[in-house]
Image (cartoon, rainbow, N blue to C red):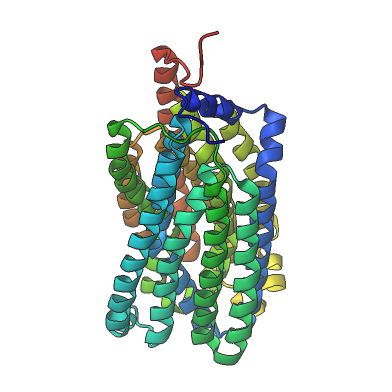
């Protein structure tokens, strides 16, 4: 028998979301599948990096590092979409508006497919001049990597739905699919066709991952509770555009902060781009770990914001897990840089190992900044965008004056990342104090 519309549906759903404030132990257990899947994917990525360093020439490996940097920058709108999708999904789940959420998801998918088609056409037209601009005479590789970045943006829509519905096991499985499938395809095609083959593998790997994410997200959106008849206030609907723009700006700036040293050094000192890329890719795998952990922190913080609460415990959980790989990376970079480079990449990639230690520390601070930014965006603190923009300008100037020398480049990056992390954490503490003083009641709290 069909149940009548129940005015308490939203409150029932909202009450069910009280679990968004877990104990430290239960929070670790919840975040662990995502962390382990991300860690496994990261390890597989390191293996790919090692094997590609042996498959490609030094110059080819430097080109690969630049293509990966371009992929990360172009795909940043996907991460911004995750922020916007998670915040809107959390709003509708708190209100009990499940039917509207599913309808919106269908519309978003249709629009993103149209945009991907337009983007693909533009890439095909512009791939040759772009490859010439980057001094890489491989327009096919450039086109495939750019299209793969576009596919990854579409993939992020479904990852946002998985995060917003707290389906962390499905999200973890999607990370594993991306790591395993992309690794197999990149290596198989890379052996056959070198750099163009690597680009083919990246493109096909992201396509398979996107299909898997769509299937998991559709299943998650079908799991509803309550009557699904409540609506979200118009102010929240308007905020989705602001969320998207703020997140896009913040994450694009974070991508520049992560990769600006590779881009500038590759332009100023191309002869050492391969050696520096070996160190850089190893260190920046830590930022990927932060991105994976952010996929747990973001929905938890967004739900807590809708309930008028904070998610500092969840932030502490992610920082605690991040501390493990960060410590290992810093120890390797400070005490065994040459041995690690020789073991992993081979002796021909020695030459920039002095940058390993400071760059490992710099990426640790950037990873902390990334998690703090995710928290602030989930709580609608958009002022962080201005701070990130200032850091990019300062970082570009500082790295430019390193004149392409690997150690000085890494040291300049380190000083910028320390300052940015410190200011971000201070801003987080100020925002938390304001929330505490406001005394805003939980939306989920119901009278007895």
Q: Position of residue 36 (x, y in %)?
A: 70, 52
Q: Nearer the viewer, residue 387 or 93?
A: 93
User: Which residue shows up at 63% across the image and 53% down it?
Assistant: 170
The part of the image, by quadrant, that contains residue 353 is bottom right
Question: Is residue 361 in view from this perspective?
Answer: no
Q: Nearer the viewer, residue 334 or 134?
A: 134
From what the image shows, is residue 422 above or below residue 434? below
From what the image shows, is residue 192 above or below residue 399? below
Q: Position of residue 358 (x, y in %)?
A: 55, 53
Q: Residue reaching furthest top?
A: 448
From what the image shows, is residue 432 above or below residue 246? above
Q: Nearer the viewer, residue 378 or 238?
A: 238
User: Which residue shows up at 30% across the image and 47% down it?
Assistant: 245
The part of the image, by quadrant, that contains residue 430 is top left
Q: Quadrant of the N terminus?
A: top right
User: Which residue shows up at 57% across the image and 84% down it?
Assistant: 56
Q: Position of residue 320 (x, y in %)?
A: 65, 38
């Amino acid at each position: 028998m069909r149940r009548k519309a129940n005015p308490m549906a939203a409150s029932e759903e909202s009450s069910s979301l009280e679990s968004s404030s877990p104990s430290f132990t239960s929070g670790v257990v919840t975040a662990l599948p995502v962390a382990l899947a991300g860690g496994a994917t990261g390890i597989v990525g390191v293996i790919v990096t090692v094997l590609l360093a042996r498959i490609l020439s030094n110059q080819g490996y430097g080109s690969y590092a630049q293509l990966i940097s371009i992929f990360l920058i172009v795909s940043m709108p996907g991460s911004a979409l995750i922020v916007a999708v998670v915040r809107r999904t959390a709003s509708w789940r708190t209100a009990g508006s499940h039917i509207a959420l599913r309808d919106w998801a269908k519309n978003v998918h249709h629009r993103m497919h149209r945009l991907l088609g337009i983007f693909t056409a533009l890439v095909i037209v512009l791939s040759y001049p772009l490859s010439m601009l980057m001094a890489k005479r491989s327009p096919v590789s450039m086109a495939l990597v750019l299209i793969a970045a576009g596919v990854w943006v579409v993939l992020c829509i479904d990852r946002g739905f998985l995060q917003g519905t707290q389906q962390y096991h499905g999200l973890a499985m999607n990370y594993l699919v991306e790591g395993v499938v992309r690794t197999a395809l990149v290596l198989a095609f890379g052996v056959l066709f070198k750099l163009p083959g690597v680009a083919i593998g990246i493109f096909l790997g992201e396509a398979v991952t996107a299909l898997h994410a769509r299937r998991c997200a559709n299943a998650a959106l079908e799991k509803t509770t309550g009557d699904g008849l409540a609506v979200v206030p118009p102010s929240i609907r308007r905020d989705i555009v602001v969320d998207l723009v703020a997140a896009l700006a913040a994450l694009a700036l974070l991508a520049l902060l992560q990769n600006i040293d590779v881009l500038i050094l590759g332009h100023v000192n191309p002869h050492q781009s391969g050696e520096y890329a070996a160190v850089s890719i190893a260190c920046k795998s830590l930022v990927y770990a932060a991105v994976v952990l952010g996929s747990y922190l973001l929905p938890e913080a967004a739900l807590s914001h809708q309930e008028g609460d904070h998610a500092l415990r969840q932030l502490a959980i992610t920082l605690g897990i991040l501390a493990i790989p960060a410590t290992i990376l810093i120890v390797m970079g400070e005490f065994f840089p040459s041995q690690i480079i020789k073991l992993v990449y081979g002796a021909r990639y020695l030459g920039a190992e002095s940058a390993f230690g400071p760059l490992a520390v710099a990426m640790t601070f950037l990873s902390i900044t990334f998690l703090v930014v995710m928290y602030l965006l989930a709580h609608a603190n958009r002022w962080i965008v201005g701070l990130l923009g200032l850091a990019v300008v300062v970082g570009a100037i500082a790295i430019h004056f390193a004149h392409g020398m690997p150690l000085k480049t890494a040291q300049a990056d380190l000083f910028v990342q320390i300052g940015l992390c410190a200011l971000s954490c201070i801003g987080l503490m100020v925002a938390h104090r304001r929330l505490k003083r406001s005394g805003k009641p939980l939306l989920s709290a119901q009278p007895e």
